Amino acid sequence: MVSERAKLHTALTFLQFCHAGNHIFLRIALNTGVSKLVFPVYRNITAFILLAPLAYFTERKDRPPINSYCLLQFFLLGLVGITMKEGFYLVGLDNTSPTFASAMQNSVPALTFLMAVILRYESLRLNRLNGIAKVLGVLASVGGASIITLYKGPTIYAPESPLAVHQGQFLSLFEDFNGKNMSLGGIFLFGHCLSWSGWIVMQAFVLKNYSAQLTVSAFTCLFGIVQFGTIAAFFEKDPKAWQLNSIDEAYSILYSGVVISGVAAAIQIWTISKGGPVLASIYLPLQTLLVALIASIVFDEEFFLGGIIGAILIITGLYLVVWGRSQETKSDEPENRVDRVEEKIDSSSLIQPLISVHNS
């Protein structure tokens, strides 16, 4: 039997493979000229079609009642996790580049860790080795992912196929900064990272009061569709933007909708419920490494020394955080046992008579 911990780490790793593939499909979609406002609407509609019946049939016996407070929480999850997160990303990407956007996203684990500590979802004891290990692990993972995106170094793998030349020309289109506002783009991308971190922490809070994970994901999608659809209807004036122009665009929408907004969103909220917001976010830098590896294999892109250094730091950071959390759990167990024994003694003393009476 696979342990719960092994399932959790396997799910988190699989989640980053899903996100890494999304970068590839999103690149294909943008190359077809897809509308940056219409694409998220279709993506989340596809996810809702998948999540809604799945949530209804699998959780109908265990689903808590939905009241106005729950609907408000779902609305805020849709606002922060879909409308703000995806909206800020699209505006930021439009004014910068995918490389810069990817580098900014690497701050999500650190921001999530900071939010979780402030809101006391995560303990931080710097006077203990496990607390220092968690901080160093977060910094190492963020630093490793940043090195992959910002530092190249000597070439480790250099394909000579025609596809590599074509891909180099394709990437140069995204690195053209003429007419772009880098400062504005950086502000919006930072808002995107804050939204992503806040969304992860908010999900942990909502799950404490409402345990039906698929229902939470489905309602988040629904409110995201309503919010983003309203924005797209107001700002996208060209009716042709709502038409699918190619099979590549359709595949990109299906992948982003089914895999990312559907399957990955459900896995993410499950990992948050099992491991907390920090563990769910610390795996995010892994997708930067996976994107570099996939791009070198699928698109015949060059792979640089920075990728090797970044990979070592990311894996080291993941190990430090996981080790720190496991040591923290072990060190807390004796204290919890002592507390339980004391509570048992205290409660038993309340019901025992001061003088025992023996029946003769």
Image (tube, rainbow, N blue to C red):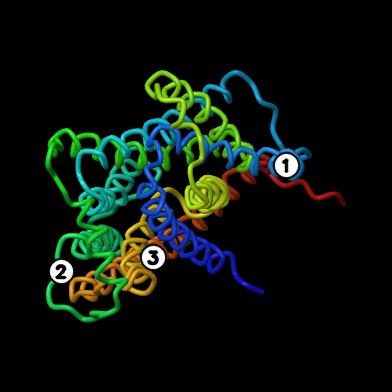
Mark 3 and mark 1 residues within 8 Å of each other at the beta carbon = no
Q: Nearer the viewer, mark 2 or mark 3?
A: 2
Specify the quadrant of the image occupied by residue 148: bottom left
Q: Secondary structure at mark 1?
A: helix
Q: Classify residue 259 as left or right of residue 109.
A: right
Q: Earlier in the sequence, mark 2 or mark 3?
A: 2
Separation (CA) of disc 2 from disc 3: 28 Å
The picture places residue 163, in percent across and down from the top left corner, at 32, 71
> Where, quadrant-wise, is the N terminus in this rendering?
bottom right
Residue lying at the far right of the rendered structure: 360
Real-space CA distance between mark 1 and mark 2, rounded to the nearest whole angstrom: 48 Å
Q: Earlier in the sequence, mark 1 or mark 2?
A: 1
* Mark sitting on residue 322: 3
Q: Residue under circle 2?
A: 152
Mark 3 or 1: in front is: 1
Instruction: Residue at 44%, 35% (x, y): give it.
Output: 82
Residue at image x 68%, y 43%? 352
Q: Is residue 138 left or right of residue 68?
A: left
Q: Residues within 10 Å of mark 1 (few under 14, many from 20)?
A: some
Q: Position of residue 132 (x, y in %)?
A: 24, 61
- What's the CA distance linking mark 3 and mark 1? 31 Å
Which residue position holds label 1?
59
What SS does tag 2 mark? loop
- Of badges 1 and 2, the one in the foreground is 2
Task: Point out which mark residue 43 bears.
Answer: none
